[in-house]
Image: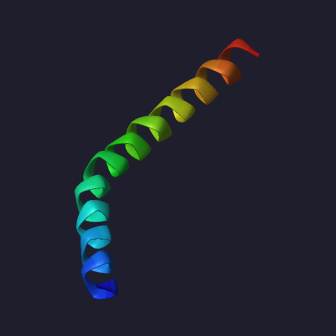
Amino acid sequence: MLELNLESQLFSWRSLKKPFWQAVRFGGMGVIIGWILKSCAG
């Protein structure tokens, strides 16, 4: 039972990983763009 639960968690993590990394990438770009704009405005 525990092994099956672990496997299902791993599967859900794998399915979440792709949109998670896309969000990290877009979030990182947003932070970089915001930092550039702030340094230009400041």
Tally the numbered discs. Answer: 0
In the image: residue 18, left or right of residue 23: left
Against 14, is 40 above or below? above
Q: Where does the image place residue 30, in percent across and percent down from the top left?
A: 49, 30
Instruction: Specify the quadrant that holds the N terminus.
Output: bottom left
Q: How is the image coloured?
A: rainbow
In the image: residue 42, left or right of residue 2: right
Depth check, front residue: 24 or 37: 24
Q: Quadrant of residue 19?
A: top left
Q: Quadrant of residue 37?
A: top right
In the image, what residue occupies the spot 26% across and 52% down? Answer: 18
Question: Which residue extends farthest right?
Answer: 42
Against 34, is 9 above or below? below
Question: Which residue extends farthest front?
Answer: 1
In the image: residue 33, left or right of residue 39: left
Q: Where does the image place residue 2, in percent across and percent down from the top left?
A: 34, 85
Q: Where does the image place residue 39, in percent across and percent down from the top left?
A: 69, 23
In the image: residue 36, left or right of residue 38: left
Instruction: Specify the quadrant that holds the C terminus.
Output: top right
In the image, what residue occupies the spot 31% across and 57% down? Answer: 17
Q: Where does the image place residue 25, in percent across and percent down from the top left?
A: 39, 43
In the image, what residue occupies the spot 24% across and 81% down? Answer: 4
In the image, what residue occupies the spot 63% across and 29% down? Answer: 35
Depth check, front residue: 22 or 1: 1
